[in-house]
Image (cartoon, rainbow, N blue to C red):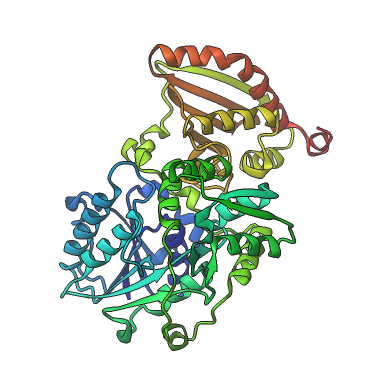
Amino acid sequence: MNILLTGVTGYIGKRVLIALLEYDHVVYCSVRDVHRLDLSLFKNQAHKIRVLQNDFLDPKSLDNIPVEIDAAYYLVHSMSSDGNFMDKEKISAENFKLALEKTNCRQVIFLTGIVNEEILSDHLKSRKTVEDTLQSSSYALTSLRAGIVVGSGSASFEIIRDLVEKLPVMIAPVWLRTKCSPIGIRNVIQFLIGVLGKEFTYNQIYDISGGDILTYKQMLMGYAHVRNLRRYIYTVPVMTPKFSSYWLYFITSTSYSLAVHLVDSMKIEVIARPNELASQLGIQLYSYEESIQQAFDKIKQNDVLSSWYDSFSNPFHQKNIWQYVEVPEMGTFSDKKQRKVVDEAYTINQIFSIGGNNGWYYANFLWKIRGLSDKMVGGVGLRRGRRNSNEISAGDSLDFWRVLYSNKQEKRLLLFAEMKLPGEAWLEWKIEDGILYQTATFRPHGIAGRLYWYAVLPFHYFIFNGMINALVKEKKEQKKL
């Protein structure tokens, strides 16, 4: 089959692509930024992939969608974007529908949220509007409605993980008593792949879950049980939605805009209605605690396939950060260091493993302070970490950086800053002729940018010297640091 896959660089989409490639399908991957899809990750299956650059807010950009599409996945959402995300989601769905009606597409598969209350959060209301918009007489729509998705790298899992791992005692909002139906990411992908081409699922709506109905408090305690942690949670009625959003934002790795939408949604019960779809597709359902254990199995194996952190927020889509792959030289400040490389293989491994749990090899406490200060002014902070402790690709998030270029064979890694700054910043490493070159570049915006650069210059001297020295240390010497 020829399949159009949208949202392919997102948490769900990347996993759907991997699953589809196991079959004899040609997958047309629709992406807003072609740089975001690293085909080298798919090794011998890259020949099954076709890449299309589309922006569903711009109907003209959809003219390249081929007529010979047999089925499509609609996995586009704008919940973490700024502004009126509901209008953007509806416009995107309308443009997608009009584009698909010009093709041979017979089925569209849409992953959405469970809707079973009259009063809905803005997020669920928008998802329902998108579902209604996608209805067409030209193709069949299969809607899969899910609640909380649990898996390594999912927003829900990472938030639960942050809360339980960091807080032995929690004073929490009353919405922790809200009930929901969680589902493991493994089951979500099985359902998404399972309904493909199944005519009995055409023009049908299914709620999907792992079978448990739990409060958010029970989910937190269930995580603690799997991790053998003793935790105490007390709910109080005095936390306003705004205060709750800040509570999530400062304690967890979520962005503030996403925290607002999550708190809004967590006040609404999302309980899956029973159906026979799992048995019809031969899917074994996993309980909430089994899904938590599976997530940790992936983390231990360093095999997290995708992470919600790697999704761009809307301001960075609008900014088109790929224009910054070419680091400017004019109108910038720079801090340049170079060292002779003793063990090239070791240094390359250290460069491409930097950040996340591996740290920044020198003065990590200063990096943490910088991350905290960024968080205080509404930035992303350091808590995003990295998806994989050893491998990194263009488009990945790396603490408060975004990877613009990553190539081990060329021995070059280029990062672009996503922290709040009065300017634009790059950090680059490359090895040429046995010399490691480390360059920090900053393009200031006005006087504030220039004052910022001079204010942090003393810290840069110690941090960047220490970091490059650590990168070129021999393995035995590094262990002593």
> Residue at the location (67% across, 44% down)?
357
At x 39%, y 18%, the residue is: 445
Relative depth, front residue between 290 and 324: 290
- Locate residue 165, reporting x and y percent: 67, 51
Would you say residue 387 is visible in this rendering? no
The reply, left or right, for residue 408 in relation to residue 64 is right
Position of residue 133 in the picture relative to residue 377 (left or right): left
Q: Based on the displayed image, in which of its 4 quarters is residue 111 positioned?
A: bottom left
Is 107 in front, or is 38? 107
Residue 112 sits in which quadrant? bottom left
Residue at image location 27% in from the left, 52% down from the top: 86
Residue 461, percent from left and from top? 64, 17
Does residue 324 appear in this view?
A: yes
Quadrant occupied by the N terminus = bottom left
Rendered position, 4 above or below 341:
below
Residue 151 percent coordinates (x, y): 55, 63
